[in-house]
Amino acid sequence: MPKPRKNSDSEPPFNPAALRAMMERALGGFGPNKRNDEARAQDLVYDAMEASTWERRLRLVRQALELDPENVDALLIVAEAADLDSTELIEALRGVVAAGAKRLGKEAFKELVPHFWGFIETRPYMRARERLASALRKAGRLDEAAAEYAEMLTLNENDNQGVRYDLLPVLLTQGRLDEARSLMERYKDDCQWNVVFAWGRVLERLLSKDEVGAANALAVARKQNAHMEAYLKGQRKLPKNLPGSYSPGSKEEAQCFAGVLLSAWNAHPETSVWLSNQS
């Protein structure tokens, strides 16, 4: 969900002070907790997610928070709409995640693991946690991002959100090869149909000093998605806007994942030299 433009004529985003107040209310348990109010608030948030303008989106979110100050999805939209720097955003998102955990209760983290996403009530929490991990990754706080992604996979091993496709490049960027190999083994079929795992395998083999294995993995990666190679070689620029959907092997898939993969390859310049020399 894109943030509102600075010069937008729509209703201004929440400021940091208002955001902190909302976090305090959510974590303090202030406000109505009746099930019908919670349901009405969630319906408003779903409408907000589909809103065509930020003015309408924020209006609906405010209405939702009046009914249910602890609504995690609403708090998440507020955090991302507020004019925050990366550090402030991360702290705000930690507050949203904490609010989500509080709402679920301790028993959920005992009874619903490892199939968290299979329960509707857990999904706002998982969405917030994914946004937190993403913010940490973009801020260069890779150890923290990797820990968040790994914990999400523990909670939900089926990984309906696809966070493994962000985790693998983080591990490869840091040269955490044992963990990268473990992740690829855990989801071993992905190398055949997902661009991150296919091209990630090439990088992992190179970092393991196995050029023969890298060449074999390259053949598989080219078959899986040949469009990615131009991004990794610097022959094609990263897209400004990502497509809304993709299919395996498509140019849209390459566009969606070129950024995270390129960050991992660029962290090891010698691997890019090797790739450039492959015909």
Image (cartoon, rainbow, N blue to C red):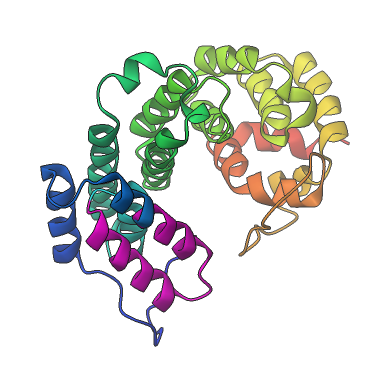
Using the image as rendered, state which of residue 109 and residue 167 is in the foreground. 109
Say left or right for 127 vs 225: left
Q: Main secondary structure of the magenta part?
A: helix
The picture places residue 251, in percent across and down from the top left corner, at 79, 51
Up the image or down, 60 lies above or below 138; here it is below
| Residue name at image x 61 percent, y 21 percent | 207
- Res 119 visible: yes
| Residue 74 in the image, given as x and y percentages of width and height | 34, 56
Rendered residue at 37%/68% (across/down): 60
Q: Position of residue 50 (x, y in %)?
A: 53, 64
Q: Residue at x 24, y 41 (%)?
A: 99
**Span highlighted in magenta in the image:** 41-69
The furthest residue to the bottom: 9
Is 37 left or right of 220, judged from the image as shown? left
Name the quadrant containing residue 40: bottom left
On screen, residue 268 versus residue 80, left or right, reads right
Q: Is residue 29 left or right of residue 192?
A: left
In which quadrant of the rendered image does the C terminus lie?
A: top right
State the residue at coordinates (79%, 24%): 192
